[in-house]
Image (cartoon, rainbow, N blue to C red):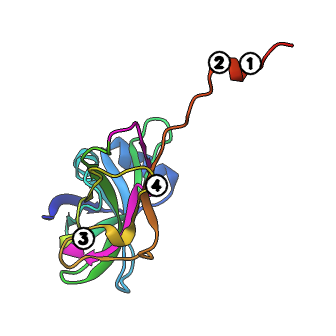
């Protein structure tokens, strides 16, 4: 995954009023922390940040006005409950070559075996450990031909090189279940005596 470059400004005022003012100025408030450094409070250009965060686990290069560049990943994103716009972001400093633990979406491909079976997703994301500059955007698993009773465990997932599971390999990710049989109408209503 390549770095997404964003511009940011240091913030020297804090609190609700300051955060609201930042949002009015089209900046999303955030905090950069990690590696034993003093946390930096920043404002990041709101639209560019929103577009960058459409990619899960985006690797961001924040060009902080008057303070240099920081390589970060989003650790926590706060969204408005109704409007869904970004209110605040916690950024974690990373370095090239460093391993980080992140949640990666699981995506299925293929079709189940014929017979009306249903696919039940037990985990939409799986926790993996990967190099900060090579975080996978998704993990694809083939469900082609799976029949009722089949289960895909975390250990069955094919991970990109340099990526390892951060969960127990026996953790169930997907399972195939048989469709529920419908009761005939006469049995459902009962018989009249």
Q: Are marks 1 and 2 in contact (CB under 8 Å)?
A: yes
Residue at far top of view: 192
Instruction: Please say if the residues under marks 4 and 3 sit with CB atoms less than 8 Å apart.
Output: no
Q: Residue at x 25, y 53 (%)?
A: 55
Locate residue 180, reporting x and y percent: 54, 37
Q: Earlier in the sequence, mark 2 or mark 4?
A: 4
Seen at 45% across and 76% down, the residue is: 168
- Residue bearing the label numbered 3: 159
Where residue 189 is drawn, which disc sits there? 1
Closer to the camera, 60 or 43? Answer: 60
Of the residues under marks 4 and 3, which one precedes in the sequence?
4
Secondary structure, mark 2, is helix
Mark 4 to mark 3: distance in Å?
24 Å
Residue 141 highlighted magenta (yes or no): no
Task: List the residue tagged with mark 4.
Answer: 149
Return the residue at label 2. Answer: 185
- Label 1 crowd bin: few (<14), some (14–19), many (20+), radius 10 Å: few
Image: magenta residue range: 114-133
* Disc 3 from disc 1: Cα separation: 51 Å
Residues packed near mark 4 inside 10 Å, few (<14), some (14 to 19) or many (20 plus): few
């Amino acid at each position: 995954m390549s770095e997404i470059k964003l511009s940011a400004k240091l913030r020297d005022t804090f609190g609700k009023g300051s955060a609201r003012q930042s949002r009015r100025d089209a900046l999303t408030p955030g905090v950069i922390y990690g590696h034993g450094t003093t946390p930096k409070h920043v404002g990041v250009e709101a639209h560019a940040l929103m577009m960058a965060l459409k990619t899960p686990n985006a690797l961001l290069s924040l060009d902080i006005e008057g303070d240099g560049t920081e390589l970060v990943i989003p650790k926590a994103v706060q969204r408005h409950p109704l409007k869904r716009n970004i209110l605040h972001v916690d950024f974690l400093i990373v370095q090239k070559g460093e391993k980080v633990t992140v949640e990666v979406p699981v995506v299925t491909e293929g079709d189940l075996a014929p017979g009306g079976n249903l696919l039940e997703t037990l985990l939409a994301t799986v926790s993996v450990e990967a190099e900060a500059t090579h975080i996978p955007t998704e993990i694809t698993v083939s469900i082609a031909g799976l029949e009722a009773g089949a289960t895909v465990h975390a250990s069955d997932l094919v991970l990109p090189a340099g990526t390892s599971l951060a969960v127990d390999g026996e953790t169930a990710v997907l399972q195939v279940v048989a469709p529920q049989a419908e009761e005939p109408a006469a049995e459902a209503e009962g018989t009249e005596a």
